[in-house]
Image (cartoon, grey):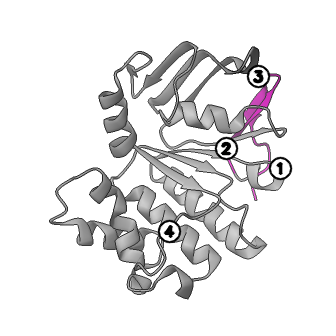
């Protein structure tokens, strides 16, 4: 499988007054198409910072980032915005759905924000909802859906532009065990269909649903390898 991302020696620090905090010091790894990778680490270890870098929401201080074979480390904001909007889908712990707005319209939001031609937007949104098993609930508002269903709508929204990479930040953190398991099964099916999935979690049980677990400690990848036992 080809590499979707390949990062080498990524580093990121933040300044507050005279104090500089190194969050990521030297991070290198690759993720292939169809691979499901979990990232773990203690609170403050840099998991969310790394996810922001991978999603082009922030820039590293040092290191290189190749996305689908192209070195985008020094790309301009317009290029990164295009890649972010068209090739990457984001899923968060909080669903970030608009209330009093149908599931269908929530899924279509990325098309509107990108000012894309939405002539077929409704059809694309229905296809995305069908992928997550919610097309029959397209007209329901978030308040009429369970937590697991709301997260599936959020995943459908992430799929609307047919991304090659999905970044998921604690996607089961607000769900009960049954709903969380359903979301993880959905992410697994998306990886099996050829998308790369990177999931950040503090929960070892969740992480073990992935193909590989990377553990961040002291700003570096402290360990990483395949999951030995899959449920």
The residue wearing badge 2 is 211
Q: Nearer the viewer, mark 2 or mark 4?
A: 4
Characterize the local packing of mark 2: few (<14), some (14-19) or many (20 or more) Cα atoms within 10 angstroms.
many
Q: Secondary structure at mark 3?
A: loop
The residue sitting at 16% across, 57% down in the picture is 117
**Residue extending furthest front?**
17
Residue range corresponding to the magenta coloring: 210-231
Characterize the local packing of mark 1: few (<14), some (14-19) or many (20 or more) Cα atoms within 10 angstroms.
few
Q: Return the disc, 3 or 1, that comes first in the chain's sequence.
A: 1
Tell me the CA gap for discs 3 and 2: 22 Å
Q: Return the disc, 1 or 4, that comes first in the chain's sequence.
A: 4
Residue 22: image x %, image y %?
A: 74, 18
Q: Return the disc, 3 or 2, that comes first in the chain's sequence.
A: 2
Q: Return the disc, 1 or 2, that comes first in the chain's sequence.
A: 1
The residue wearing badge 1 is 204
Closer to the camera in the image, 22 or 30: 22
Q: Are marks 3 and 1 in contact (CB under 8 Å)?
A: no
Tell me the CA gap for discs 2 and 4: 29 Å
Residue 70: image x %, image y %?
A: 37, 21
The residue wearing badge 3 is 219
Q: Nearer the viewer, mark 1 or mark 4?
A: 4
- The answer to whether residue 10 is magenta is no
Tell me the CA gap for discs 3 and 4: 33 Å
Q: Nearer the viewer, mark 3 or mark 4?
A: 4
Q: Return the disc, 3 or 4, that comes first in the chain's sequence.
A: 4
- Residue 109 quadrant: bottom left
The residue wearing badge 4 is 97
């Amino acid at each position: 499988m080809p590499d979707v991302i390949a990062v080498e020696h990524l580093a990121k620090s933040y300044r507050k007054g005279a104090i500089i905090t190194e969050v990521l010091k030297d991070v290198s790894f690759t993720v292939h198409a169809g691979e499901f990778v979990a990232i773990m680490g203690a609170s403050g270890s840099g998991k969310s910072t790394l996810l922001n870098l991978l999603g082009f929401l922030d820039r590293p201080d040092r290191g290189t980032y190749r996305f689908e074979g192209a070195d985008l480390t020094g790309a301009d904001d317009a290029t990164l915005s295009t890649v972010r909007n068209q090739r990457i889908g984001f899923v968060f712990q909080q669903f970030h759905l608009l209330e009093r707005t149908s599931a269908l319209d929530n899924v279509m939001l990325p098309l509107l924000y990108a000012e894309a031609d939405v002539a077929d937007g409704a059809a694309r949104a229905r296809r995305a909802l069908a992928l997550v098993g919610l097309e029959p609930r397209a007209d329901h508002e978030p308040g009429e859906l369970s937590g697991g269903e709301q997260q599936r709508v959020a995943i459908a929204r992430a799929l609307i532009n047919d991304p090659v990479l999905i970044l998921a930040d604690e996607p089961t953190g607000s769900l009960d065990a049954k709903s969380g398991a359903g979301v993880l099964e959905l992410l697994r099916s998306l990886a099996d269909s050829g998308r790369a999935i990177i999931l950040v979690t503090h929960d070892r049980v969740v992480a073990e649903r992935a193909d590989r677990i990377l553990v961040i400690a002291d700003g570096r990848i402290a360990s990483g390898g395949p999951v030995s036992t899959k449920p």
